[in-house]
Amino acid sequence: MSEPPGAAVSLAEAPPADEPSKPLTAQRVQPLRRPGRWIATAVVLVLAIQFVHGLATNPFYQWDRFGYWFLRPTILDGLLITLEVAAYSAVLGLLGGILLALARLSKSPVLRAVSWTYVWALRSIPLIVVLLFLYNFSALYKTLSVGVPFGPAFFSFDESKLATDMVVAVIGLSLNEAAYAAEVVRGGILSVDQGQHEAASALGLPKSYQFRRIVFPQALRSITPNYVNQLIGLIKSTSLVFYVSLLDLFGSAQTMGSTYPGDIVPLLLVVTVWYLILTSVVSVIQFYVERYYARGATRSLPPTPIQKLRTGLTDLRARIRREAAV
């Protein structure tokens, strides 16, 4: 019986068994083309280059005067006052915020009402109004006393002698900061899983110990980024203390601008650069604080900028080797 013609042809075309098969050629996967992304990148680069070129070549900015004023003792003295006011206000504001948050979460209706009223009032009143009110506080109360309400006073003191410009600025910023920090801290405490509270209570731990060692360290993961935003806003808000006769960084530049009206723009640039430096330092500290409190909450800690740079260089070298091999 004869075989079908198709079968005979397929057997004739089949390669011998002892002949080695040809290796498959490597096929390179082409990435998906994204013209919109390239166009947007090109537009952004052109605009950025034009902006930098304008900063560098526009004589109106007077970069020689900027260099003259940047490290002048007057500017540095104002910078030191800005740092002092921001540091004191940040610490006192955070402590006040913690107390207000605990009062808001307490079971006492009086504490909850007082805390809510304080937060509501201080978040509603502009900061400049608070500072000006405190600056003129001695006109309302020339002396302050501590004693029994509607009764004898144990001791009294002259308010005008204690309320210096620095004290007024720190108290005003701290009162305002505490109102916002209270909500940040309260939100961080509420973000802790309820099982953590129940487990700590089941172990019979005191409430203060539960808060200090279990609840608050976990809440800091949520508090840190939000409060750092508040801290950056606080650093910029220190420019308002100029209106209570305290020569901070902005106040010093404003005073020098009145004396040298031709250097107003360079002085404003000096203030801008110093504020950029301060907020950048705070942002770097924020990254490492967040990384510290991320331990145990994530499988791997976020890489530091140096680690990202090393990884990027390693990937670039590997890509160059692959391109050369092809």
Image (cartoon, rainbow, N blue to C red):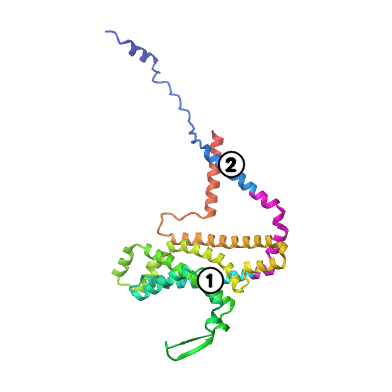
Report helix, strand or loop for mark 2.
helix
Q: Quadrant of residue 195?
A: bottom left
What amino acid type is highlighted by mark number 2?
Ala
Label 2 crowd (10 A; few <14 / some 14-19 / many >=20): few
Q: Which residues are magenta?
A: 51-77
- Residue identified by numbered label 2: 42
* Residue 70 counted in the magenta span: yes
Q: Nearer the viewer, mark 1 or mark 2?
A: 1
137 and 31: which one is in front?
137
Relative side of 236 to 50, left or right: left
> Dividing the image into 4 quarters, which one contains the N terminus?
top left
Which residue is most to the bottom?
152
- Residue identified by numbered label 1: 129
Residue 152 position (above or below residue 288): below
Give the x, y percent position of residue 303. 49, 54
* Residue 235 counted in the magenta span: no
The answer to which of marks 1 and 2 sits earlier in the sequence is: 2
Give the x, y percent position of residue 109. 34, 74
What amino acid type is highlighted by mark number 1?
Val
Residue 27 position (above or below residue 290): above
Relative side of 292 to 84, left or right: left
**Residue, x 48% and y 28% (percent of image)?**
25
**Residue, x 54% and y 54% (percent of image)?**
306
Question: Mark 1 and mark 2: span between their CA atoms?
Answer: 46 Å
